[in-house]
Amino acid sequence: EVQLVESGGGLVQPGGSLRLSCAASGFTFSSYAMHWVRQAPGKGLEYVSAISSNGGSTYYANSVKGRFTISRDNSKNTLYLQMGSLRAEDMAVYYCARGFGTAVAGTLAYWGQGTLVTVSS
Amino acid sequence: QSVLTQPPSVSAAPGQKVTISCSGSSSNIGNNYVSWYQQLPGTAPKLLIYDNNKRPSGIPDRFSGSKSGTSATLGITGLQTGDEADYYCGTWDSSLSAGLFGGGTKLTVL
């Protein structure tokens, strides 16, 4: 069974940093592209970032480019999102998702339960 | 405002059929596959349709998808109260080199 478990969310001050993690199990992690998607309270889904199966290619929404960094450790079956220069508009539930295959530009087949990031002073 | 346009809400009676549209452009829907996701209240999104019209295992054939040009459509037949949820279309944008979601459509089964 595919499982994705996010962690690392919490309260952070504006301008601060936070690192999210997503522990994957139930599949060969190194064979799949991975994604981060967020959802602000009461709002719709917003695509954040993607990374290829070997970590060699990364992609970002314009809203987070230059502030967030996606990475992965295939030896630990873990996806990361390093978030910096956090703003109030970054407050959201952050979901980790697995692609259907190696292609980054593809379907988000499985989703974690999300971790809440609150940006407030 | 989302690059992919969906109606904010749709409604229909139990047993009826509803369609949800998703409109984009040549850089996204026009040249990439479309997926549809269902988000029940208080839960994570779940994949309903991928590659425009394919259903993952376990998704009933009451759910269908189609694509024409720069628009896509999700259809749901035999509506049930358990179908009440938010529905999102999603795709890749080749110009932005990033994924995209529609703004979401809230389905109410009256």
Image: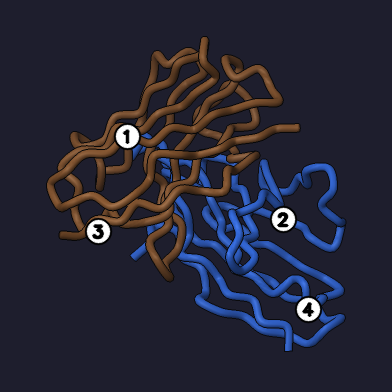
Chain colours: A brown, B blue
Residue B41: x and y in percent read 61, 69
Subunit bearing disc 4:
B
Q: Quadrant of residue A36?
A: top left
Q: Which of A39 and B6 lies nearest the eye of the viewer?
A: A39
Q: Is residue A97 above or below residue B67?
A: above
Q: Is residue A16 above or below residue A106?
A: below
B43 left or right of A50 in image: right
SS state under label 4: helix
Seen at 64% across and 39% down, the residue is A109
Kind of residue at disc 3: Glu
Residue topped by disc 4: B81
Give the CA distance from mark 2 to mark 3.
33 Å
SS state under label 1: strand
Kind of residue at disc 4: Thr
Q: Quadrant of the N terminus of chain A?
A: top right
The local crowd at label 4, few if under 14, some if 14 to 19, many if 20 or more residues have their Cα within 10 Å, is: few
Q: Which mark is residue A19?
A: 1
Residue topped by disc 3: A89
Kind of residue at disc 1: Arg
